[in-house]
Amino acid sequence: MNNPSISRLSNQSVSSVSQQPLIMREGQMFHGQIKQLFPGQMAEVQIGGQKLMAKLEVPMKAGDAYYFQVKSVTPELQIKVVSGPLQATEGQARQMSNLMDSMQLPKSPEMVAVLNHFLKERLPVSKEILLNAVDLLKTVQPSLRHEALVAIQKLVELKLPLNEINFNSLLGVEKKDGLHAVLHALRNALVTDTGIQTQTKERILAALGDAGRITATAAERALFSGAMLKLLDETVPREERFQILQLLKSSGVMASNTTLANLQSVLHSALIDSAAGNTNQTMLSGGQPMESRTIHSPGQIQTPSSLLVEAWKSVLKADFSLSSSGVDALLGQFKEMVKNTAVLQQPFRSQLTGLVEDLASKPPVEMRNSPIGEQVSKMLLRMTLDENRALPFNANVPSTHMKALLQENVAVKLPDLFRAMEQSPLPFTKELVQGAQAAVEQAVDGKVMRDVMQRLFKSLGFNYEAGLLNGNQDIAKKMDMLKPQLVALLHDSAVSPALRDAAETMIARMNGSILQSSDSGMNQQIVMQLPLEFLGKRIDATIQWSGRKKEDGKIDADFARILFYLELESIDKTVVDMQVQNRVVAITVFNENHQLREIGALLQMKLREGLESVDYRLSGVTFKPFEEEGKREAKRQNEMMSEQGGVDFRI
């Protein structure tokens, strides 16, 4: 059973060919009937339900039907006879046989299918194009013939060579073949290749790893935060805390000299060292608020914990040789920030405020390394960890202030920690892993999906050429993308044939979605294929957006159609057809699992509320099974036969 093709579903709401304005192209072949003759070899020719004026190459008789080919369209339409005249009593098969005789074409089922499709879609025809198209059609299974013909049609329209690389790049998108299998084959070929330089291999493998680790990294961050919270919780049995600490140390996340006894002191000292070396933070003076002095890196999310930690680091790096009034002013400003942070629960705020007041009673020289200061650092760390566990997809986690408390490059070591906890037989490690996965699942929303897709799209380098055309000169940064590295790899003579084929296939597949996309005037179609991965489950997604643009060239969000073709591990092939008309959304879900109707009913209210929050209205959600391929093919044949009328048939 196949998913409905992009063209098949997207054309359901489009008017039939005969209702669209007739546009002729040089080389195009069509079936028509001479309706009336005029002086100067001019004639009125009927094509389907439409009529046009054309100049004939040779004299003909009114009423006869022929297969014509467009010779030129300017300054006037000129046509020549390819086959005919055709008799009204001749059937379609006989007429097609005569046409193939006239063009000296082999009479194979594939040729009949290609000719039918070219005539229906009004494509330019030549003997060479038809023969090449037949060769490509013979390489696919009969069940994929429709998708293959659509791919061939796109190549002809784009005037691209009809070769296997171009054909397979478009056919893969048309069939919704996922990219996971292509990436896996590329990775295997890369690992086994011995000809290329080690540095080149490692860079490409790193790019492949980045493409598949976006959601895995979120789970690793959530697990790390959960493990640290458990480690800092003194109500947890000491044995569990010790085992967690050992896992953190063996994975390289924490320093090897850390113990349960000195844990609080180690974390506090790391924060002091970070504060002393933080060039982005200026020393506070006078009565200027701390918030205005905090300098954040571009794009960093300023969470309540990040603001408080940065403010606390300003206190820790203050010159404690100042007068008591100067130190008191710094602590007073920090205390005021704590009081004004609305998200803090009252017990936490009261405890933190009390610690700051106790710290203010100490002599300035004892403040920085006092046990009270260690308690403040511990509370802020726990607050940070809670935020990080709730926002596992935040690209800034571990953020600047979190990195200060841990080993350098801790993010690189989180995969080792995740694997160690997954493989551990201890019950509490299983709970931590499950908790991390649950945190990721709860954090997934529309914004997260958008960010994941954008980062994956950029990581693979789908828009690499577009960036170059737009004048983006950051070439070094772009070379970290997968696509430009594969392009460079093809110029390496040391590459093995297996790796070269795998790289060419991957590049072709990435180009396929771009070739399937189109921008014609006010209408636009965008096709994307993304190899997503959530919590170890792979999702091959093909997304097609069709809509129109406003007068200023921007997307008209009021009218659009979006098709999602998904290959899911749990429920297999799924297609979601979302149509937007004047901001009213209708959704149809195609899947063979009948339980989805019941599950979907439980989620419709949440979907409705989500759409209304962005000024859209849900009209309804419909669940349908896929049509069997055989039934679909029979339906197409019946439609074709019902449209015939004498010799003026439309295939």
Image: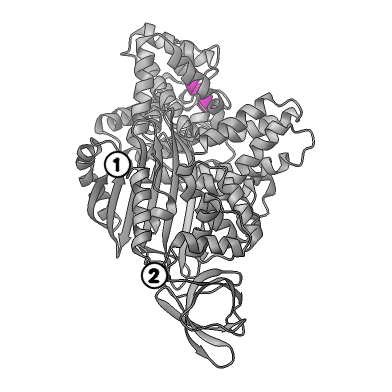
Q: Which mark is residue 193?
A: none
- Image height of 601 relative to 407, above or below: below
Residue at 33%, 28% in the rendered image: 438
**Residue 35 lies in what quarter of the image?**
bottom left
Q: Magenta segment range?
A: 266-272
Q: Mark 2 — residue?
A: 646
Q: Is residue 103 left or right of residue 143?
A: right
Residue at 38%, 72% in the rendered image: 19
Q: Amino acid at mark 1?
A: Ala
User: Looking at the image, which is closer to me, 81 or 327?
Assistant: 81
Percent x, y of residue 380: 40, 29
Q: Mark 1 — residue?
A: 342
Sequence order check, earlier mark of 2 and 1 = 1
- Image height of 436 relative to 26, above or below: above
**Residue 196 lies in what quarter of the image?**
top right
Q: Is residue 586 left or right of residue 359?
A: left
Quadrant placement of the C terminus: bottom left
